[in-house]
Amino acid sequence: MITIPITLRMLIAKYLCLLKPFWLRKNNKTSVLLIIIILAMILGVVKIQVWLNDWNNDFFNALSQKETDKLWQLVLWFPALLGIFVLISV
């Protein structure tokens, strides 16, 4: 059996042939809007993960340095971060 290697150019051409009817139809405003919403949600989740990472750093630094005031401040801030994360993720 002979296998024919698929070049990247052929792969992209086939992919574009599949996408063309979807993107060039008359009423694709809904599709574009949904893709924009999905991308915004993905960026939001990444931003929240960065905030959680920073919170983690501050929390464990306060814990190791025994800064109780800062520790309780961070403990109270965590549910807000978690709530925002859940709202964006779900």
Image (cartoon, grey):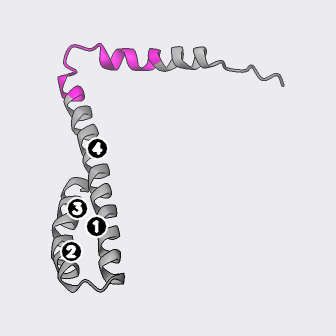
Name which of mark 3 and mark 4 comes first in the sequence: 4
Q: CA distance from mark 1 to mark 4?
A: 18 Å
Residue that label 2 marks = 74
Q: Earlier in the sequence, mark 3 or mark 2?
A: 2
User: Label 1 is placed on what type of residue?
Assistant: Trp
Residue 8 position in % (x across, y down):
61, 19
Quadrant occupied by the C terminus = bottom left
Q: Mark 2 and mark 1 in contact? Answer it, CB < 8 Å.
A: yes
Q: Is residue 20 magenta?
A: yes
Name the residue rendered at 18%, 58% in the picture.
87
Tell me which segment is drawn in magenta: 16-32
Q: CA distance from mark 1 to mark 3?
A: 16 Å
Q: Which residue is mark 4?
A: 43
Query: Which percent across, then down, holds residue 13?
Result: 52, 14
User: Going from the N terminus, do you reach mark 1 or mark 4 first?
Assistant: 4
The disc label shown at residue 86, or none: 3
What's under tag 3, amino acid-wise?
Answer: Val
Task: Label the magenta part by its dominant secondary structure.
Answer: helix
Horizontal placement of 26 versus 53: left or right?
Answer: left
The kind of secondary structure element at disc 1 is: helix
Where is residue 57? Give x, y as percent.
35, 68
Q: CA distance from mark 4 to mark 2?
A: 24 Å
* Mark sitting on residue 80: none
Q: Is residue 44 magenta?
A: no
Residue on which the image places disc 1: 55
Residue at position x 18%, y 23% from top? 29
Residue count near mark 1 (Cα–Cα under 10 Å), binned few <14, some 14–19, many ≥20: some
From the viewer's side, name the closer residue of 75 and 87. Answer: 75
Which is more foreground, mark 3 or mark 2? 2
